[in-house]
Amino acid sequence: MSFWRVLLAILFPPLAVIDKGCGSVIITFLLTLAGWVPGVIAALVILNNPE
């Protein structure tokens, strides 16, 4: 994970996972709508996944 990707995940989580697939973006977007912290956590978990 690069510094810019982590910073983007903190500021706007769905944009940080845009290259991980449509499902990841939708899940992160819905979690961000439910609350900012769950969206950030989901984005960081998705970005930390090596696959």
Image: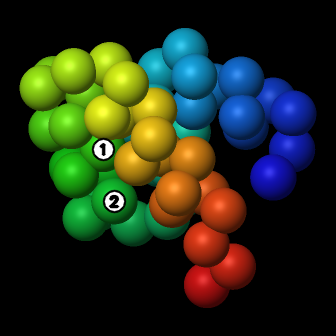
Residue 13 coordinates in the image, percent (x, y)? 45, 31
Judging depth in this view, the residue of 29 and 45 nearest the camera is: 45
Three-letter amino acid code of the residue under disc 1? Thr
Coordinates of residue 24 in the picture (x, y in percent): 34, 59
Disc 2 and disc 1: Cα gap in Å? 6 Å
Q: Is residue 29 visible?
A: no
Q: Looking at this view, is 25 or 41 the one in front?
A: 41
| SS at badge 1 | helix
Give the numbered dot on residue 24. 2
In the rendered image, the residue lying farthest to the right is: 3
Say whether marks 2 and 1 touch (CB < 8 Å).
yes
**Which residue sits at x=31%, y=34%?**
38
Q: Is residue 8 above or below residue 1?
A: above
Residue 8 lies left or right of residue 46; in this view the side is right
Q: How is the image coloured?
A: rainbow
Residue placed furthest toward the bottom: 51
Query: Crowding near pointer 2: few (<14 within 10 Å), some, many (20+)?
Result: some
- Asked which secondary structure carries label 2, the reply is helix
Q: Give the numbered dot on residue 28.
A: 1
**Residue drawn where x is 51% and y is 60% of the image:** 46
> Which residue is at 73% across, 37% downward?
5
Residue at 86% x, 44% y is 2
Res. 33 in view: yes
Q: Mark 1: few, some, or many residues within 10 Å (few <14, many ≥20)?
A: many
Q: Position of residue 12 (x, y in %)?
A: 47, 21
- Looking at the rendered structure, the kind of residue marked 2 is Ser
**In the drawing, does residue 31 fall left or right of residue 10?**
left
Residue 40, percent from left and from top: 45, 32
Mark identifier at residue 9 = none
Occupied quadrant, residue 4: top right
- Location of the C terminus by quadrant is bottom right
